[in-house]
Amino acid sequence: MRSISPAPRPQAAALASGAAPLVVPDPCAHCDARSVSVCSALEDKDLHRLATLAEVMEVAPGETFIEEGETPEHFFNVTGGTVRLYKLLPDGRRQITGFARPGHFLGLAVGEANAFSAEALETVRVCRFSRSRLRAVLDDFPAFERRLLRSAANELVAAQEQMLLLGRKTARERVASFLLAQARPLRACDPPPGRFHLPMTRTDIADYLGLTIETVSRTMTRLRTEKLIALPSPAEVVVLDRGRLEALAGGFEEERI
Amino acid sequence: MRSISPAPRPQAAALASGAAPLVVPDPCAHCDARSVSVCSALEDKDLHRLATLAEVMEVAPGETFIEEGETPEHFFNVTGGTVRLYKLLPDGRRQITGFARPGHFLGLAVGEANAFSAEALETVRVCRFSRSRLRAVLDDFPAFERRLLRSAANELVAAQEQMLLLGRKTARERVASFLLAQARPLRACDPPPGRFHLPMTRTDIADYLGLTIETVSRTMTRLRTEKLIALPSPAEVVVLDRGRLEALAGGFEEERI
DNA sequence: GCCCAGCCTTGTTGTGGATCAATCGCTTGG
DNA sequence: CCAAGCGATTGATCCACAACAAGGCTGGGC
């Protein structure tokens, strides 16, 4: 990971970079955890003061910037790209607990060890705070703390949904749920795109859904032959029948005909 | 659910009840999400002011006091007993996302609908806040908001651990993990009890671990015949070989002999 | 004491998804 | 142009756990 702002005064670089120093979830009433917009939650002057406490970093694809079990030293806000968060078992079994997109906060946990690893899927931009200063930052910015609480609550809801998926859904239902989640727009106010790109591999999808790559591949193929989706390429998905896909993802019985 | 304090001034009853008006996780450095102590995080005067905004309630076993999909009207703090939190699929499949014990906060989610249902397993005591007043409460008690954030972060860690369990662990590993989690003391500073009581049924355990009751039952029986645990009665568990149980729960290979 | 209803355990059979194994296609580098 | 490497797909087989089935235990009501 290289810092975009290696100068003694990183804030200057951060502000000069042109990129948003911080990306926070949109407070718009219609929006859910996945919707984001830039900086709309905090007042501009607060954001600028906040940015002086942070560094804007860029993470190369495949690079791990949070390691499970290590002592957390930083707190991150994802501002660009997609991050995969995962946990490992000693024999190498992997569970991806989520994909962090812009607006996501990482490293909230208070413990002495990171609960998961974080790895850039694409080139990722993050805004990084020193944990030792986090307390002071929260004290100075109650609005920021409020935002974190809201963000954590939304993540909890997503985690519970994922537990339902992992514990009780069939492979078909899991893949359908996953595709629909990926089809969500960044801003919930926008209509869901009918066609989208998957930034992760089949292995990632399998490790996220608690399946094997073969099952993911077979399931996608079957959804394609059934005309629920189209796959112009392995990473490009077109939703052809959103209704049936949603019914499938929601666990409504099918196969009745 | 009946209110213990049906008088026009519930706070009086709450304070008079003798029970802790609020139970919050212990800030002790060695403690994790499951450890609790009474009121140690907030100053006494804050707690008493907080308590004037809340009602102490008692929930009978089997009673549902949060319904998935409904508009949340209250915010709860569990002060006694165990609560099961779950999500349902339309055909009745159930996933228990967690068991809330004293110190747990419920109803944090900001959305328009509850993400899960909550049902008392035993007689449960909760401290209830009106959601419409929650914002004012948080504004008045920044320490309380901080505590909520910490609590949510701990819950997120637990949720990620559960995703690993549901997505990648075998039935044996799941049951071992579950038993060890149940064996944790309420205060992490205390030593883990060698013997403990399971307040939930096999069906609950199965729905929590993403298994069937038969698999849970068979797995427990096998752990018993292998002398890892003893089962004086179905709901009483004695840990006989914590080391092997921990190795199993952690996913370390076995069956090498 | 007896009956009944839950809950738990144990036995048998079935199956969804894992595992093992090719093969294909695309990309990269020589 | 070919070789190597990686990801995705497809086929064949296997197995851990689900599903179905049958008792057994326990506690509460009468």
Image (spheres, coloured by chain):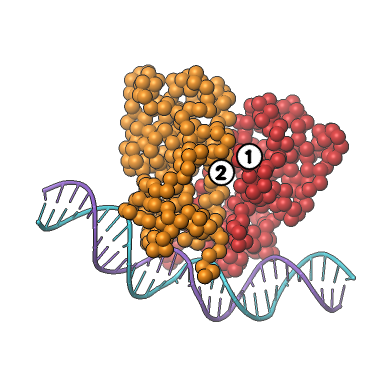
Chain colours: A orange, B red, C purple, D cyan
Subunit ID for the residue under disc 1: B
Residue B84: x and y in percent read: 66, 52
Residue A59: x and y in percent read: 34, 35
What numbered label is drawn on residue B45? none
Circle 2 — which element? helix
Subunit ID for the residue under disc 2: A
Residue identifier under label 1: B108
* Residue at 33%, 27% in the rendered image: A4
Can you say whether B245 is above or below B26 in the image?
below
Q: Contact (CB < 8 A) between labels 1 and 2?
A: yes
From the viewer's perspective, is D5 left or right of A111?
A: left
Residue A81: x and y in percent read: 38, 38
Quarter occupied by the N terminus of chain A: top left
Q: In which quarter of the image is residue D21?
A: bottom right
Can you say whether A66 is above or below A168 in the image?
above
- Label 2 Cα crowd, 10 Å radius (few <14 / some 14-19 / many 20+): many
Residue identifier under label 2: A156
Q: Nearer the viewer, residue A32 or D29?
A: A32
Q: In which quarter of the image is residue A69?
A: top left
Q: Nearer the viewer, residue B22 or A42?
A: A42
Circle 1: residue type: Leu
From the viewer's perspective, is C27 left or right of B168?
A: left
Can you say whether B34 is above or below B140 in the image?
below
